[in-house]
Image (cartoon, rainbow, N blue to C red):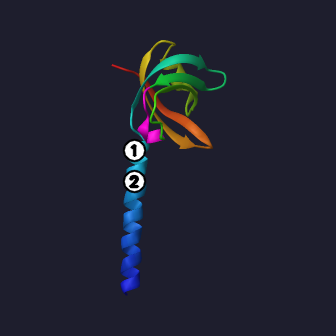
Amino acid sequence: MKFSRLMRAAATVLAAALLATAVAAQEAIDGEVKKIDEGAGKVTLKHGPAKSLGMDEGMTMVYRVKDPAMLKQVKVGDKVKFEAENADGGIVVTKLQKAK
């Protein structure tokens, strides 16, 4: 009985931790479009720290995009907000929009 309750409590804590990680991974990051490669489905973004991705310093980096149609909504020089997650062995931009 006690073991069963302990296992349920541990599962609840683990689920809460996973949910918190998922929410953090979807934190919006400010950036600027430096290059667009529609054919490869990639965008080069200069951005500040992205704590949700484990980046404590700003940098310029090439990212794959989840949906290449997102690239048609921005152009080089645009200030953007984006969300990204670690997936398929790399970081993938899941949301990209012009900053307001």
Q: Residue furthest front?
A: 57
Quadrant hosting residue 65: top right
Q: Tell me residue 21's x, y (percent).
A: 42, 50
Q: Secondary structure at mark 1?
A: helix
Q: Residue furthest bottom?
A: 1
Quadrant hosting residue 80: top left
Q: What segment carries the magenta color?
A: 48-53
Q: Amino acid at mark 2?
A: Leu
| Count of marks, rendered view | 2
Residue under pointer 2: 19
Quick one: label 1 or label 2, which is nearer the N terminus? 2
Q: CA distance from mark 1 to mark 2?
A: 9 Å
Mark 1 closeness class: few <14, some 14–19, many ≥20 residues within 10 Å: some
Looking at the rendered image, the quarter that the C terminus falls into is top left
Q: Tell me residue 77's x, y (percent).
A: 48, 12
Residue positioned 60% across, 26% down in the render = 42
Q: Are marks 1 and 2 in contact (CB under 8 Å)?
A: no
Residue positioned 40% across, 61% down in the render = 15
Residue under pointer 1: 24
Residue positioned 56% across, 37% down in the render = 91
Q: Amino acid at mark 1?
A: Ala
Front residue (pair 91, 61): 61
